């Protein structure tokens, strides 16, 4: 007797699919890509049907029927499901968990795949005119009104839930006073009527567009290597127009912090079509809406972060990855996929072009371009008449330093401020100081749960761990010797801010880092201070390296690069160079060319020399020869098996057993187990085993049999473990 078996991906930590029977008495046709509700253990869960087949390795009577088919139509096409399954196989990840990553939250919860509008609360004109202070006796109403006044387009219930407690009664009251309106907006904004016309492209841009669009059908990968401000975005836009004219859709992937309202607005105005945004900052309803608009073709263009690479499309014709070097394109927990690499596979599978753009390409992509696997397009000059800023190193050896700033750097800052230029001071370390030191006994503040120092936050008067989130008040005396001579050691952005305010008391200053921008809308406010010129000094971390353009910045001061030159992570120099060049690229325009000063104790370091004298391209080529000599990626292929547990023994035991299980594998070296660079984190001990292979095929051949064996290892039950294919971070 033949029967119908449903093979389903179910949210579970197991690397396998599960077989079920069709629901009793349902007439919905069964097609892969539909969600199903089913009993799993003692729970009811939502899974995704991947195959309809007629046999199961399990006896039929052991199979249970699913409870319901949730979708009339499959969510993904067979081709898209094949991509998802490819990613599951390539990253050797539990399929149910991978599919969870690919689904918007509401669909994960089993809600219907239909878009409802987005409900928003907004202060109307009367409400905007009210000073929240007049609501002194009703602090909740005052707080809500202040929030709404700061958000011109209103806030969704999700956003309000995240920021205010128990705001609904206050909303009701404000509504009764006639200050608040509640409205339901269509979830995909219509095409804007204000459009801007493109600039006439320069010769390099035209050449790039011509080569990109000469074959719009068929797979081709392009590396668009263009200095910041060279007009890469204009190249994307021109190529996108061509694809839209053929009636096909475009997916634009950007790093997490790159998706700004300004970028969206630029695309909307230039293209004159609806552009859907897909990222984690959206309310659940908005996200579902954008996802469905990609699927039904309502959104001709989708701009999204990482997980948008798994969104279904009606007819995808082009993929663009902006800032393709950015580490945030790789997920660092759970399903550790690289959106860039999955996107290249998606383009190949669909036979469409893909463009990887960056001013500072990853060494992986650069090597692909140099070896001819990718076509290499170059934009060596800034667009328009802007001049590229020049880099200089500032040798700080033997020089007195105050708060991390040498005298020559202070003078340079003063000089630029006097000439009314803006100055950007970059330090990739948050907080006031990396640790607190007892001057009398040498005690330093350490996290009890991590192998890390507690960072001093002077404003908040707290010590915080940036790894586990633990915090405590700043002690008044040393816990070891009782001395009160406790001193912050080293500097973070908060301390730089203090030092610069003291040195330049009359100059407006903003600090931009994860701490100063935590509140929603805070970043926009700070950026506005910069663009309006109210702030002449900008202090910040790598948040400043992304997406923004500061045309009036004439000096970029890089306070500390030395960590990047001597880190245990083989990617550290690459990341350092990318950060320096990206930060430097924020500055300068035609009439105000930028100057970039880099403080260092190692002015003769060959990589730094090459970067400063010749630029990122030559630096990257030199770094590639070092990688080749060391046998590191992209000339070898890595996977990292991590394990952690409360006890110190368990991770190593598991990794030893894992190593045993892998012995005899052809062409794969096993390095470890060793403790992770930060062995203890959030109270757990961590260790790792590195797999290094000369060929991708050898690595994956091993992983395919090894990953299921790991699941079966007894010692694996005492640890939390994960497998990271093509790891970007080595801790
Ligand atoms: P990138 O993406 O490489 O950083 P953009 O495309 O954002 O560069 O361009 C940088 C600036 O130069 C923008 O203000 C853009 O409008 C302008 N621009 C780009 N191409 C041209 C051009 N061909 N002529 C004049 N201005 C241009
Ligand atoms: Zn002490
Ligand atoms: Zn900690």
Image: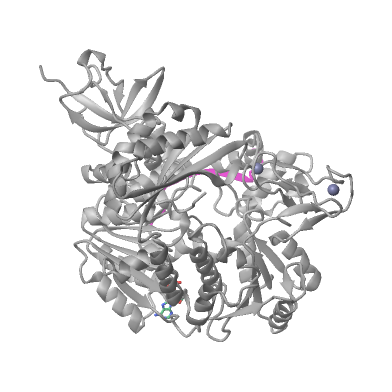
Residue 537 painted magenta: no
Residue 451 lies, with reference to residue 569, above or below; the image says above
Give percent across and percent down for residue 419.
69, 84
Front in this rendered view, residue 682 or 510: 682
Residue at the front extreme of this rendering: 664
Quadrant of picture, ligand 3: top right
Query: Residue sitting at 38 percent across and 75 percent down?
Result: 198
Give left or right: position of 367 versus 215.
right
Give percent across and percent down for residue 193.
40, 64
Residue 178 painted magenta: yes
Give percent across and percent down for residue 504.
78, 73
Specify whether residue 73 is in view.
yes
Residue at the top extreme of this rendering: 61
Query: Residue sitting at 19 percent across and 62 percent down?
Result: 218
Residue 421 lies, with reference to residue 191, above or below; the image says below
Front in this rendered view, residue 311 or 572: 572
Task: Give, as a single range, the part of the protein colored magenta.
Answer: 176-190
């Amino acid at each position: 007797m033949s029967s119908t078996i449903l093979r389903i991906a179910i949210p579970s930590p197991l690397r396998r699919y599960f077989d079920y029977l069709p629901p009793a008495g349902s007439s919905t046709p069964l097609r892969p890509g539909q969600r199903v509700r089913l009993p799993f253990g003692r729970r009811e869960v939502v899974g995704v049907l991947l195959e309809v087949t007629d046999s199961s390795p399990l006896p039929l009577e052991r199979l249970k029927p699913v409870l319901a088919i949730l979708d009339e139509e499959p969510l993904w096409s067979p081709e898209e499901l094949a991509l998802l399954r490819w990613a599951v196989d390539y990253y050797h990840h539990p399929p149910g968990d991978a599919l969870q990553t690919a689904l918007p939250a509401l669909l994960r919860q089993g809600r219907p795949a239909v878009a409802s509008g987005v409900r928003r609360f907004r202060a109307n004109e009367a409400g905007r005119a009210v000073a929240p202070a007049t609501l002194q006796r009703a602090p909740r109403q005052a707080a809500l009104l202040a929030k709404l006044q700061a958000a011109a387009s209103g806030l969704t219930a999700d956003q309000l839930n995240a920021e205010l407690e128990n705001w609904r009664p206050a909303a009701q009251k404000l509504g009764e006073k006639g200050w608040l309106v509640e409205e339901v907006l269509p979830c995909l904004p219509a095409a804007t009527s204000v459009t801007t016309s493109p600039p006439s492209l320069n010769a390099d841009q035209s050449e790039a567009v011509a080569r990109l669009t000469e074959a719009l059908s068929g797979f081709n990968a392009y590396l668009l290597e263009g200095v910041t401000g060279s007009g890469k975005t204009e190249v994307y836009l021109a190529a996108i127009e061509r694809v839209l004219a053929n009636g096909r859709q475009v997916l634009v992937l950007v790093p997490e912090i790159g998706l700004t309202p300004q970028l969206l607005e630029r695309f909307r105005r230039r293209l004159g079509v609806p552009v859907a945004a897909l990222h984690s900052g959206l309310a659940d309803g908005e996200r579902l809406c954008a996802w469905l608009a990609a699927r039904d073709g309502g959104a001709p263009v989708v701009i999204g972060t990482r997980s948008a690479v798994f969104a279904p499309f009606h007819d995808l014709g082009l993929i663009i990855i902006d800032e393709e070097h950015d580490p945030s394109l790789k997920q660092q927990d759970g399903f550790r996929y690289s959106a860039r690499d999955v996107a290249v596979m998606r383009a190949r599978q669909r036979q469409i072009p893909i463009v990887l753009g960056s001013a500072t390409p990853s060494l992986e992509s650069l090597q692909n371009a140099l070896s001819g696997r990718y076509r290499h397009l170059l934009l060596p000059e800034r667009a328009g008449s802007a001049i590229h800023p020049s880099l200089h190193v500032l040798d700080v050896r033997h020089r007195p330093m105050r708060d991390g700033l040498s005298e020559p750097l202070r003078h340079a800052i003063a000089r630029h401020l006097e000439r009314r230029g803006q100055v950007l001071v970059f330090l990739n370390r948050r907080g006031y100081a990396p640790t607190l030191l007892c001057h009398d006994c040498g005690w330093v503040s350490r996290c009890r749960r991590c192998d890390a120092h507690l960072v001093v936050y002077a404003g908040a008067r707290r010590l915080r761990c940036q790894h586990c989130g633990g915090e405590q008040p700043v002690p008044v005396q040393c816990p070891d010797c009782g001395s009160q001579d406790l001193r912050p050691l080293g500097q973070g952005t908060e301390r730089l801010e203090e030092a610069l305010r003291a040195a330049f008391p009359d100059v407006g200053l903003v600090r931009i880092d994860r701490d100063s921008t935590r509140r929603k809308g805070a970043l926009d406010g700070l950026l506005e201070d910069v663009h309006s010129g109210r702030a002449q000094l900008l202090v910040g971390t790598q948040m400043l390296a992304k997406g923004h353009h500061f045309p009036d910045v004439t000096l970029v001061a890089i306070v500390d690069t030395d960590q990047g030159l001597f880190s245990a992570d083989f990617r550290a120099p690459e990341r350092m160079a990318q950060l320096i060049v990206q930060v430097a690229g924020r500055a300068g325009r035609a009439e105000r060319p930028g100057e970039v000063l880099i403080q260092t104790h190692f002015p003769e370091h060959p990589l730094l020399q090459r970067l400063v004298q010749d630029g990122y391209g030559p630096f990257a080529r030199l770094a590639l020869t070092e990688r080749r000599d060391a046998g590191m990626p992209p000339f070898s292929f890595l996977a990292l098996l991590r394990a952690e547990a409360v006890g110190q023994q368990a991770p190593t035991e598991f990794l030893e057993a894992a190593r045993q299980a892998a012995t005899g594998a052809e062409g794969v070296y096993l390095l470890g187990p060793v403790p992770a660079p930060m062995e203890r984190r959030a109270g757990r001990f961590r260790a790792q085993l590195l797999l290094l292979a000369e060929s991708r095929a050898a690595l994956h051949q091993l992983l395919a049999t090894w990953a299921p064996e790991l699941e079966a290892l007894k010692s694996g039950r005492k640890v939390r473990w994960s497998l990271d294919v093509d790891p970007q971070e080595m801790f």
